[in-house]
Amino acid sequence: MKSQKVLTVCLGNICRSPAAQGIIESLSAKSKSVFLELDSAGTAAYHIGSPPDSRSIAALKQVGIHIDQQKARQVSKADFDEFDWILAMDRENLANLKKIQPKHSRATLVLFGEFHPSVAFGEVVDPYYGGESGFIEMRQHLTNIAQAFVNHLTLKREDSVSR
Ligand code: 4NP
């Protein structure tokens, strides 16, 4: 079965979006019906080429997810034709992505938190300037949304198969 390509996007591509990539990869690897190829990027160029923040790496390592091999990059217009889904971590990321989104491009651009039924899940708060506990909260928040996202794709697939 054809896989879908998913790009997670935050500001710096060192805290939230690499973590989101690792968590979605881990959840989709357990799914028998959803096949995903993941990447992540930042709207800003500050950290191009850097590995994820050590606090993100540590928070995910605690749950057996390894993201230390990732390298930060900046999102580009070409990504809108390369990916099926572009998932923005907060509203500012979403607004910046809309500014560069070419007309009639392939990707569905959404606020990642919208996949979760609770409105409180709307934005994934930037943990960069806070302490380590913020990274654990980020991991839990991302895990809840990622599960809702994978469930959404599973239901869509079951719907298309039963038609
Ligand atoms: P991220 O967090 O967008 O989740 O990767 C940030 C990382 C770096 C900076 C801001 C946010 N920065 O200003 O360098």
Image (tube, grey):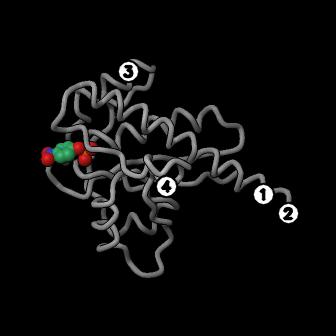
For badge 2, the amino acid type reads: Arg
Q: Residue at x 34, y 63 (%)?
A: 94
Figure quadrant of residue 138: top left
User: Is residue 62 positioned above or below 39 on the image?
Assistant: above
Residue at image location 42% in from the left, 41% down from the top: 21
Quarter location, residue 150: top right
Mark number displayed over residue 89:
none
| In-image side of 9 versus 45 (left or right) | right
The amino acid at mark 4 is: Glu
Specify whether residue 47 is in view.
Answer: no
Residue identifier under label 3 = 61
- Identified at 63% across, 31% down, the residue is 30
x%, y% of residue 59? 34, 24
Which circle, 1 or 3, is nearer the viewer? 1
Residue type marked 3: Lys
Q: Give the Cα distance between marks 1 and 3.
A: 35 Å
41 vs 47, left or right, is right
- Mark 3 neighbour class, 10 Å CA radius: few under 14, some 14 to 19, many 20 or more: few
Q: Which residue is mark 4?
A: 114
Relative depth, front residue between 36 and 94:
94
In front: label 1 or label 4: 4
Question: Which of the two labelled residues, at mark 2 and mark 3, occupies the earlier sequence position?
Answer: 3
User: Which disc is residue 163 wearing?
Assistant: 2
User: Is the C terminus in the top left, top right, bottom left or bottom right quadrant?
Assistant: bottom right
Counting residues from the start of the chain, the first of labels 4 and 2 encountered is 4
* Dot label at residue 159: 1
SS at mark 1 in the image: helix
